[in-house]
Amino acid sequence: MAKPGRTGLARIVAATGYSLKGLRAALRHEAAFRQELVLALVLLPLALWLGEDGVQRALLAAPVLLVLVVELINSAIEAVVDRLGDEWHELAGRAKDLGSAAVFVSLLLLVLVWGLVLWPRGDL
């Protein structure tokens, strides 16, 4: 967490460091994030290639990046729940299930957007 006295560029630099630390942690500890990152490394270049204009490229790229964002949030939720204790609790299980559902919905959005953008052109 940034020190309270940091402002301006020092705060931005510190925040960037924390963000990179979080990405490294996701790569190191989260298999699902690594799998979705591989998917993104395939789909993002395809989005740029298959999109006919800037709007289509953005429409194809955005849900790919959203999956990564939602997976990071899901991983954060799981880490906090796991930190609170090993014993089973209905709310802990619900929190993990809801995070997983959010990832699933973001993946459905990816499939839906890619289908709607590419299907009419016959690219699928």
Image (cartoon, rainbow, N blue to C red):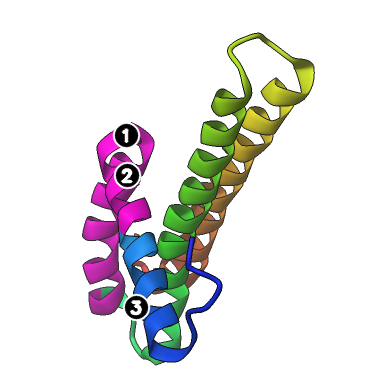
User: Residue tagged by mark 3?
Assistant: 13
Q: Are marks 2 and 3 in contact (CB under 8 Å)?
A: no
Q: Position of residue 108 (x, y in %)?
A: 55, 49
Within 10 angstroms of label 2, few (less than 14), some, or many (20 or more) residues?
A: few
How far from the left and from the top, in percent, is residue 3? 49, 68
- Quarter-wise, where is residue 60 in the image? bottom left
Do the residues bearing badges 2 and 1 touch, measured as CB atoms within 8 Å? yes
Element carrying mark 2: helix
Q: Decide if residue 45 is on the left or right side of residue 76.
A: left
Queried whether the magenta region covers residue 31, the answer comes back as yes
Q: Which element is circle 1 on?
A: helix
Q: Is residue 122 magenta?
A: no
- Residue 5 is marked as none
Quickly name the residue at label 2. Answer: 25
Residue at the spot of label 1:
29
The residue stretch that appears in magenta: 21-49
The reply to whether discs 3 and 1 touch (Cβ–Cβ < 8 Å) is no
Q: Report crowding for label 1: few under 14, some 14 to 19, many 20 or more residues within 10 A (C-alpha).
A: few
Is 50 drawn above or below residue 28 in the view shown? below
Residue type beneath disc 2: Ala
Q: Position of residue 12 (x, y in %)?
A: 41, 81
Residue 22 lies left or right of residue 41; in this view the side is right
- Label 1 sits on what residue type? His
